[in-house]
Image: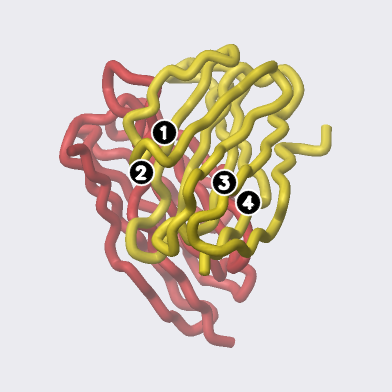
Amino acid sequence: DAGVIQSPRHEVTEMGQEVTLRCKPISGHDYLFWYRQTMMRGLELLIYFNNNVPIDDSGMPEDRFSAKMPNASFSTLKIQPSEPRDSAVYFCASSSDWDRVSAKNIQYFGAGTRLSVL
Amino acid sequence: GQQVMQIPQYQHVQEGEDFTTYCNSSTTLSNIQWYKQRPGGHPVFLIQLVKSGEVKKQKRLTFQFGEAKKNSSLHITATQTTDVGTYFCAGLLSGTYKYIFGTGTRLKVLA
């Protein structure tokens, strides 16, 4: 498997524009996570899905952020309108299952999308 | 809200010296994972600890989970330049399917 694939790797946009980040999880993985990483706030969980259904979106900063998972092999994180404070590295991760004691809940991270909002 | 703090935030060591990072949670954790992120890279899973007081070793790395399941540590013996990166702990909140990542410790190894 190629691992978790994210696109684009880098995105530079102007304030007010819509930004869409994409993620393809590892085939067969039932859980998908979106994280944001900044120097100030570290690695924050934004939202996670189980079997394409959003389970916990309490980390989504505000209504400008939305995430979808239309099928098991694709997810998007959209920011509309974007603001300079959204500049960060956004990671997508997936895991095969959820078991407190097994290795099934290891999260495999994609390479990330570095977003710069000017 | 729930927080997972790590200390130190940064650590510079000479190659061959030991290194330890500590992870502390404000709440009891179901389990804890450790990840390593190389500069410019993404977090990569290292290990998972589940039981109270558990100790696991991976070559020069020793991981420990506290008795109260609220703290953990990672110790590297005789650091090498390949150990450079940021080490994160991630705690699974009891009763949830949510991992909270620690603030991370950035390790720099001087040759």
- Rendering coords of residue A37 (x, y %): 46, 54
The reply to whether the C-beta atoms of the residues labelled 1 and 2 are less than 8 Å apart is yes
Residue A112 numbered mark, or none: 4
Where is residue A27 shown, x and y percent of the image?
76, 22
Chain under disc 1 = B
How crowded is the residue under tag 1: few (<14 C-alpha within 10 Å), some, or many (20+)?
many
What's the amino acid at mark 1?
Leu
The answer to the question of whether label 4 and label 3 lie on touching residues, with beta carbons closer than 8 A, is yes
Q: How far apart in space, not on screen, are marks 4 and 3 (Cα)?
A: 4 Å
> In front: mark 3 or mark 1?
3
Quarter of the N terminus of chain A within the rendering:
top right
Residue A91 marker: 3
Identify the residue under disc 2: B64
Q: Are marks 4 and 2 on the same chain?
A: no
- Looking at the rendered structure, the kind of residue marked 4 is Gly
Q: Which residue occupies the foreground of this view, A53 or A25?
A: A53
Q: Are marks 4 and 3 on the same chain?
A: yes
Res. B49 mark: 1
Chain under disc 2? B
Determine the chain carrying the residue at label 3. A
Chain B: colour as depicted = red
Chain A color in figure: yellow
Q: Position of residue A36 (x, y in %)?
A: 47, 49
